[in-house]
Amino acid sequence: MSERNYTIDLLRFIASSAVVLFHLNEPFAYVPNAYRDLAKQGWLGVPIFFVVSGYCIAMAAGHSKNPVDFFVRRFFRIFPSYWFSLLVVIGCVGFQVFYFGQNSVTVLPRSFKEISATLFLLTAPFSTIQTTNWVYWSLTVEIFFYLVIGLSLFLRKSFRPYAALAISIAALFPSLSKIPGLFFLSEWAAFGIGFSLYQVSKRKNISYPDVLILLVNSANLLFLEHYGYYAVTGFLTFSCIAISVFYKDLPRNLFSRAGDYSYSVYLLH
């Protein structure tokens, strides 16, 4: 895969850093302080994360030999690091119990069902089983993005844009995200504009479905499911990626290099 986009790396770094600062600030969120006022906006790393994710998953799908190849690559992209982070969480719990006689870190899964769901990211918001680390909820959403895009690869190429358009239209109706298994629709708008940007950038002749997907998800992000800072941040991210796609000579720097490690930092904070 030779389409390395260093702006994507930089945006990953910004998103993970923002979310980390947000969570580290939570115990002091109500103490007056200019830094804390800024850190409280760190949740805006979420729309950055999903827009970038949409672009990257579209790129991964475009480079996959077949659906199985896509799923295998995505599996090894997510789960080894995720499982390692679980071991770190368990280690932190063990350390606290051993030295302090209590566990205030997290609630660990106990039953076979809870353990299985935790191992394979089938926890909240997919199910009522809580995550061992709150940030894992976004990985569960991303896993379902993988599932949807991976399954679409079984379709003929000419049908795939229409499938993406159908999902984008479904995401216009917030009540559908309440249906079990469709929870990911609540974040589809941010994901969809990143996904459609990659599709548009790679086509010599832009098709009507591609344009409609972009318009539908933009309308959703601006006026329906999300609003305010979330929507603005999503579009700023979209704009940054769009600029980088059509201006490819942006230099690699320290911050884009840090983006290479953003997933690990995000998991372990």
Image: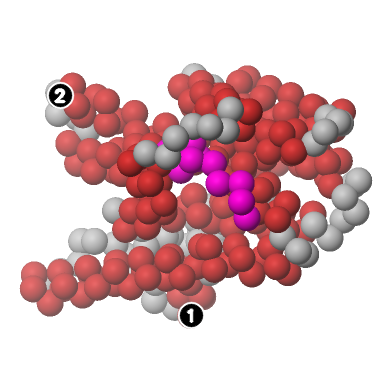
Residue in the picture at 42% in, 32% down: 44
The picture quadrant where one finds residue 200 is top right
Q: Which residue is mark 1?
A: 112
Q: Secondary structure at mark 2?
A: loop
Q: Which residue is mark 2?
A: 33
| Marks 1,2: beta carbons within 8 A | no
Is residue 20 at all visible to an observer of this figure? yes
Extent of the magenta region: 1-12
Residue at image coords 57%, 33%: 248
Residue 76 x %, y %: 54, 68
Counting from the top left corner in percent of width and height, residue 157 is at 87, 50
Considering depth in this image, is 164 or 99 the residue closer to the camera?
164
Residue 3 forms part of the magenta stretch: yes
Q: Is residue 216 magenta?
A: no
Q: Quadrant of residue 101?
A: bottom left
Please indicate whether residue 125 sits to the left or right of residue 170 in the image.
Answer: left
| Residue at screen point 51% across, 75% down | 116
Q: Is residue 131 above or below residue 113?
A: above
Label 1 – label 2 distance at C-alpha: 45 Å
- Chain-order first, disc 1 or disc 2: 2
Under mark 2, the amino acid is Asn
From the viewer's perspective, tell me whether residue 96 is left or right of residue 5: left
Q: Which residue lies at the image location 51% right of the left edge and 23% below the top edge?
A: 236
Instruction: Answer with the quarter of the image where residue 19 lies.
Output: top left
Rendering coords of residue 189 (x, y %): 64, 34
**Disc 1 element:** helix
Coloring applied to the structure: secondary structure
